[in-house]
Image (cartoon, coloured by chain):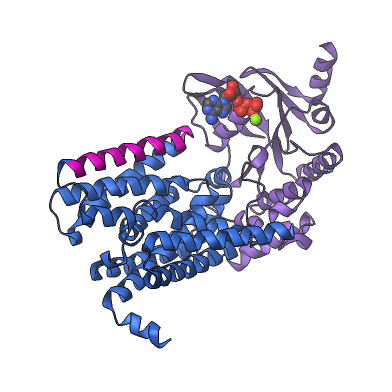
């Protein structure tokens, strides 16, 4: 079943076209990787999907309520030294639009607790986020994203700056989530890892979509080049 | 203690105490967000705009109680302009630099074309405890109540937006609304606080408490609480020092903040 349909999507910053005429579909249950070199437009496309960048022309259709999307931005500029505990950060993932309460509900806290335990972060509950290693920080952010029980997760280079054993571990975490039914759309420039884990791949080059297809087609395509 | 009570029997001292405590409390809360989001120069820019507005009010011959009818709308408008420029291009520092120096020059021109640098204008630039009126005191009480309510009601939202704006926006939360709310409250704090602190120094009340406290805390919540405490304590120390040593109020308060900030920095450096 299709859950995301893009037809001729174009996004630009001023007069720079960052995504040009992109068409693709994502199906429920996909582990969809967007591959491409730096500056090819991956981040911009993800931002277009979540509504952080206006779409200039074309059509982007999400076939379910937008609240069920979780988005993790690239390299989380939020500086590493931000004074907040793991618990504060995970809990903030339960916030929804429309519901502005000064305190978190019991249900919110339960959900947060659940995703914290799921990722094995409970021992870092009161640790300042900056005192964790890069991999643990990513786990905390993933726990925050899971609070919503998302149907679709958009991940922008979630492994940038992590060493390979940790990203391996995180990749398999995502694969487990994917097996439980969460659709994953991930931007990455690590072609090797993509080949190992993705179910479908889209290649972006210079703001164009060069290729969309299954992982088998992608591997065959790679051999040719 | 007896001396303190004696001191409070001066109405101007009570007014300064209430107004200043209120202002330093609000500035510290807002400062936490402004500093973490790297918007802290907005305070400085707005203070220069406030100076320009005050020059205009003085030139128009308004009484001090009426100045706020000029300063408040001008500074609030400027805060919205600065916030939009900051959000749009990511060139916030340039925008603030241009707006603030422009406003400062305009203020100086207005002042010299009218009455020149009289005591009113001087007090606004450097601050004075004598300048705080009963009217200011009531305004500052209203300000504290408004800021506190906003902070409590929107605390979770403000945390989320401060920590990760794009996550908040992707969750369908109106980041713009909160950003404008913060700049509006900052504008209010500056307009009411500049009489005591002076337009040249008011922005330090926004920056120092958060910078001092962030080295000492683990959580965002304790940062908010500690900043407020540090800010009020430094204000009180500065105020009494300025009274007993006959030093300028605004500068003494900034001095107290700097001393605490340096001490905390040295202590935490040694621990590391
Ligand atoms: N905020 C921005 N303003 C202007 N241009 C941008 C902005 N963000 C990205 N770009 C440009 O858009 C293009 C695509 O960038 P991006 O989507 O970040 O690529 P990727 O994520 O694949 O590295 C690049 O040419 C980049 O310079
Ligand atoms: Mg990118």
Q: Residue A21 is drawn in which quadrant? A: top right
The majority secondary structure of the magenta stretch comes to: helix
- Which shade of the palette goes to chain B? blue
Question: Residue B92: x and y, percent?
Answer: 45, 37
Residue at image point 34% right, 80% down: B7
Compared across the picture, whether A108 is left or right of B189 comes to right
Q: Residue B133 is drawn in which quadrant? A: bottom left
Of all residues, the one furthest to the front in this rendering is B245
Question: Residue B60: x and y, percent?
Answer: 13, 49
Compared across the picture, whether B151 is left or right of A173 comes to left
Q: Nearer the viewer, residue B244 or B110?
A: B244
Letter of the purple chain? A
Tell me the quarter of the image containing the C terminus of chain B.
bottom right
Question: Residue A179: x and y, percent?
Answer: 79, 43
Q: Nearer the viewer, residue B219 or A14?
A: B219
Of all residues, the one furthest to the top in this rendering is A224
Q: Nearer the viewer, residue B7 or B63?
A: B7
Residue at image point 58% right, 41% down: A64
Q: Residue A150 in magenta?
A: no
Q: For the magenta stretch, what is the residue range?
A: B89-112
Would residue B8 be visible to someone looking at this image? yes
Q: Which image quarter has ligand 2?
A: top right
Q: In the displayed structure, would residue B28 be above or below residue B98?
A: below
């Amino acid at each position: 079943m299709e859950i995301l349909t893009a037809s001729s999507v174009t996004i630009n910053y001023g007069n720079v076209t960052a995504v040009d005429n992109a068409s693709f579909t994502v199906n429920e249950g996909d582990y969809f990787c967007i591959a491409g070199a730096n500056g090819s437009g991956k981040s911009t496309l993800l931002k277009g999907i979540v509504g952080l960048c206006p779409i200039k022309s074309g059509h982007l259709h999400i076939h379910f309520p937008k609240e069920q999307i979780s988005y993790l931005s690239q390299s989380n500029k939020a500086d590493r030294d931000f004074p907040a505990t793991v618990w504060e950060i995970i809990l903030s993932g339960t916030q929804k639009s429309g519901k502005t309460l000064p305190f978190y509900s019991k249900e919110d806290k339960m959900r947060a607790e659940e995703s914290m335990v799921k990722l094995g972060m409970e021992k870092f509950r009161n640790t300042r986020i900056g005192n964790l290693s890069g991999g643990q920080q990513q786990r905390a952010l993933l726990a925050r994203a899971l609070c919503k029980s998302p149907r679709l997760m958009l991940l922008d280079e979630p492994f940038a700056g992590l060493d390979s054993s940790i990203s391996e571990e995180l990749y398999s975490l995502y694969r487990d989530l994917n097996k439980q039914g969460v659709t994953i759309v991930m931007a990455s420039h690590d072609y090797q890892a993509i080949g190992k884990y993705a179910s479908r791949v889209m290649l972006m080059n210079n703001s164009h979509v060069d290729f969309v297809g299954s992982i088998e087609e992608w591997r065959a395509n790679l051999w040719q080049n | 203690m007896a001396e303190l009570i004696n001191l409070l029997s001066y109405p101007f001292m009570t007014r300064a105490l209430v107004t200043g405590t209120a202002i330093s409390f609000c500035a510290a809360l807002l400062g936490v967000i402004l500093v973490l989001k790297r918007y802290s120069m907005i305070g400085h820019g707005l203070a220069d705009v406030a100076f320009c507005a005050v020059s205009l009010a003085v030139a128009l011959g308004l009484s001090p109680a009426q100045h706020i009818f000029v300063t408040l709308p001008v500074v609030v408008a400027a805060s919205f302009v600065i916030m939009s420029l900051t959000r749009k291009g990511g060139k916030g520092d340039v925008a603030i630099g241009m707006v603030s120096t422009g406003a400062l020059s305009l203020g100086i021109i207005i002042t010299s074309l009218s009455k020149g640098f009289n005591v009113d204008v001087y007090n606004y630039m450097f601050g004075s405890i004598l300048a705080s009126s009963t009217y200011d005191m009531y305004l500052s009480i209203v300000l504290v109540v408004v800021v506190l309510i906003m902070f409590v009601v929107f605390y979770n939202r403000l945390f989320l937006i401060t920590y990760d704006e794009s996550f908040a926006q992707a969750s369908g939360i109106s980041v713009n609304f909160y950003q404008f709310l913060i700049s509006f409250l900052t504008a209010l704090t500056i307009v009411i606080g500049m009489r005591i602190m002076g337009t040249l120094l008011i922005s330090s009340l926004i920056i120092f408490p958060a910078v001092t406290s962030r080295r000492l805390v683990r959580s965002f919540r304790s940062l908010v609480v500690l900043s407020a405490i540090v800010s009020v304590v430094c204000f009180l120390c500065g105020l009494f020092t300025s009274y007993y040593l006959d030093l300028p109020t605004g500068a003494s308060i900034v001095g107290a903040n700097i001393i605490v900030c340096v001490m905390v920095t040295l202590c935490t450096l040694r621990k590391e």
